Image (cartoon, helix red, strand yellow):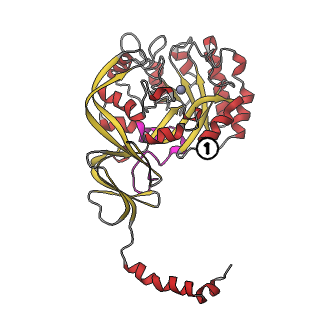
C-alpha cells in the first residue's frame, strides 16, 4: 500500500488531483433521484398536491412544485400518485423466501410478519425477515408450534410462556411483539387464558400484543379488558359471533374504551372469516374508522381476495373512505403502530426515502370479501414502482 505522500508523487496521483478543478466546475448532480409531476399525498403534513419529490443520500431532500437541478435518475410520475412507502403491519411474508421481495414490488417498504411461527420454529421466519430488502419485523405466535390447522392453542400447553420468553430473549432485535389468534377454531375455549399468557410474555419485554379477533368463544368485553395501550386488534371487521358492533349498530362501549386508552384497530384483510362487506359498512357508518390497513398477506392471497396492498386499500375507497384517509391508514398511521417504523410513513424532508408510486385508475373493478360476496367499484389503486432508501427498487410491468 502507498501512503498519502507516495501517492502524490506518482503520475496517477498527479492526474487525479489535476482533474479536480474541472470536476468542480461542472454542475454536479444535485439529487440522486427526482420523482416528477405526481400527485403527492403526505398524510403527515396533510399534503395532497401535484409536486416533485427530490431524493439525496437515501433521504427526502425536497417536496416542491417544479424542482430544478440535476438528478442521476428521474421517475416520470405524471398522472400517478406519489405516497410514502406502504407499511403493512399484518403479513405472513416471512413464510416464504421471496415474500418480502414480492410485497416490495407492491409498494410495501416496511412490514410485520404477524405470527407465522411460534417459539419452536421462529428462526425460519427470522431468517427470511433479516434477509428482506426492506425493513421487516416479526411477531411471535404465542402458540409455540405456530399456525396449526387444528388450532394454534387448542392444546393450551402450546401457549408456553417460558418458551416464548426464551425465543424473544434470543431475538430481541427482530421480534417486535406477540400475536395471539383467538378465534374458536384456533384457541377454542382457551381464548381468554391464551391472551392472559400472551400479555404475561409481552409485558416482560414491554412489547405490544396483536390479537386476531372474530368468532371467539369469549365475548369482546372480557377479552378487551386484557388489552393495554399500544396493543393492536386485527380483523376488526370480523362478523359475529363476537364482533365489535351490536345488532342495533352501536360500537360496544368496551371497544370505544379500548380505542380511548390507545388500543389500535386494524383491517387484516386475509381470506377466511375476517372481512364481510356489510360489517365493514356498518362499522364505518357508526364512525369507527380503522387506524391501519393490513393485508394478512400470504402467497395464496396474491391470486384471491388480497391480491396486493393497493388493491386492499381500494376496497375502502369503494366503501366511501377518502383517498387521504386510505393513504394515511397504509402509511402515517401504520408507522405509529411499531417503534421500528417511527419517522417512516411520511415524505417529510429528512425522512428515509421510501416511496410508493401508485396509479388510481377509473374503471369497473370487482372486489371480493372473505365470504364470496362481490362488489363493483369504479376506482382501483395499482402499484407502479417502489423507491427504497432512495433507489428505485421495483417496477410493475
Ligand atoms: Zn394473519
From the viewer's perspective, tell me whether residue 66 is left or right of residue 142: left
The segment highlighted magenta reads 330-354
Identity of the residue drawn at 66% across and 81% down = 2
Q: Is residue 184 visible?
A: yes
**Which is more toward the observer, 221 or 198?**
198
Tell me the quarter of the picture where residue 278 sits: top left
Tell me the quarter of the picture where residue 309 sits: top left
Identity of the residue drawn at 31% across and 32% down = 380
In this rendering, the answer to whether 382 lies above or below 195 is below
From the viewer's perspective, tell me whether residue 49 is left or right of residue 209: left
Numbered circles on residues, count: 1
Instruction: Report if the beta carbon of the residue with label 1 is closer than 8 angstroms to ligand 1.
Output: no
Residue 159, position as x, y percentages in the image:
69, 22
Residue 58, position as x, y percentages in the image:
47, 57
In the picture, the quarter occupied by the C terminus is top left
Q: Indicate yes or no whether the magenta region holds residue 336.
A: yes
Q: Residues within 10 Å of mark 1 (few under 14, many from 20)?
A: some
In this rendering, the answer to whether 356 lies above or below 60 is above
Identity of the residue drawn at 35% across and 27% down = 315
**Which is more toward the observer, 215 or 11?**
11
Q: Which residue is mark 1?
A: 130
In the picture, the quarter occupied by the N terminus is bottom right
From the viewer's perspective, tell me whether residue 232 is left or right of residue 60: right
Residue 204, position as x, y percentages in the image:
68, 34
The dominant secondary structure in magenta is loop
In this rendering, the answer to whether 150 lies above or below 330 is above
Amino acid at each position: 500500500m502507498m501512503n498519502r505522500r507516495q501517492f502524490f508523487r506518482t503520475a496517477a496521483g498527479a492526474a487525479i488531483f489535476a482533474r479536480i478543478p474541472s470536476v468542480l466546475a461542472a454542475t454536479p448532480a444535485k439529487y440522486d433521484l427526482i420523482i416528477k409531476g405526481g400527485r403527492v399525498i403526505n398524510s403527515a403534513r396533510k399534503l395532497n398536491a401535484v409536486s416533485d419529490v427530490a431524493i439525496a443520500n437515501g433521504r427526502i431532500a425536497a417536496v416542491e412544485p417544479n424542482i430544478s437541478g440535476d438528478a442521476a435518475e428521474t421517475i416520470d410520475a405524471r398522472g400517478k400518485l406519489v405516497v410514502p412507502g406502504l407499511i403493512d403491519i399484518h403479513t405472513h411474508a416471512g413464510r416464504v423466501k421471496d415474500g418480502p421481495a414480492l410485497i416490495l414490488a407492491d409498494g410495501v417498504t416496511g412490514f410485520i410478519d404477524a405470527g407465522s411461527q411460534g417459539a419452536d420454529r421462529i428462526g425460519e421466519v427470522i431468517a427470511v425477515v433479516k434477509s428482506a430488502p426492506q425493513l421487516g419485523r416479526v411477531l411471535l405466535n404465542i402458540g409455540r408450534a405456530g399456525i396449526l390447522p387444528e388450532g394454534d392453542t387448542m392444546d393450551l400447553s402450546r401457549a408456553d410462556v417460558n418458551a416464548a420468553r426464551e425465543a424473544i430473549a434470543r431475538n430481541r432485535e427482530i421480534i417486535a411483539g406477540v400475536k395471539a389468534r383467538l378465534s374458536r377454531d384456533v384457541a377454542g375455549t382457551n381464548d381468554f387464558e391464551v391472551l392472559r399468557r400472551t400479555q404475561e410474555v409481552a409485558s416482560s419485554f414491554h412489547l405490544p400484543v396483536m390479537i386476531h379477533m372474530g368468532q371467539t368463544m369469549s365475548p369482546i368485553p372480557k377479552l378487551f379488558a386484557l388489552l393495554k395501550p399500544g396493543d393492536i386488534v386485527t380483523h376488526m371487521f370480523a362478523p359475529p359471533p363476537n364482533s365489535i358492533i351490536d345488532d342495533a349498530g352501536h360500537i360496544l362501549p368496551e371497544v370505544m374504551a379500548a380505542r380511548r386508552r390507545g388500543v389500535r384497530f386494524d383491517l387484516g384483510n386475509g381470506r377466511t372469516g375476517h372481512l364481510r362487506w356489510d360489517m365493514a359498512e356498518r362499522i364505518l357508518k357508526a364512525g369507527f374508522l380503522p387506524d391501519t390497513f393490513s393485508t394478512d398477506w400470504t402467497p395464496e392471497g396474491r391470486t384471491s381476495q388480497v391480491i396486493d396492498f393497493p388493491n386492499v386499500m381500494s376496497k375502502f375507497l369503494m366503501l366511501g373512505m377518502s383517498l387521504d384517509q386510505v393513504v394515511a391508514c397504509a402509511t402515517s398511521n401504520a408507522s405509529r403502530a411499531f417503534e421500528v417504523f417511527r419517522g417512516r410513513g411520511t415524505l417529510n424532508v429528512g425522512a428515509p426515502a421510501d416511496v410508493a408510486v401508485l396509479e388510481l385508475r377509473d374503471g369497473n373493478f370487482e372486489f371480493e370479501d372473505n365470504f364470496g360476496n362481490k362488489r363493483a367499484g369504479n376506482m382501483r389503486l395499482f402499484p407502479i414502482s417502489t423507491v427504497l432508501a432512495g433507489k428505485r427498487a421495483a417496477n410493475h410491468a
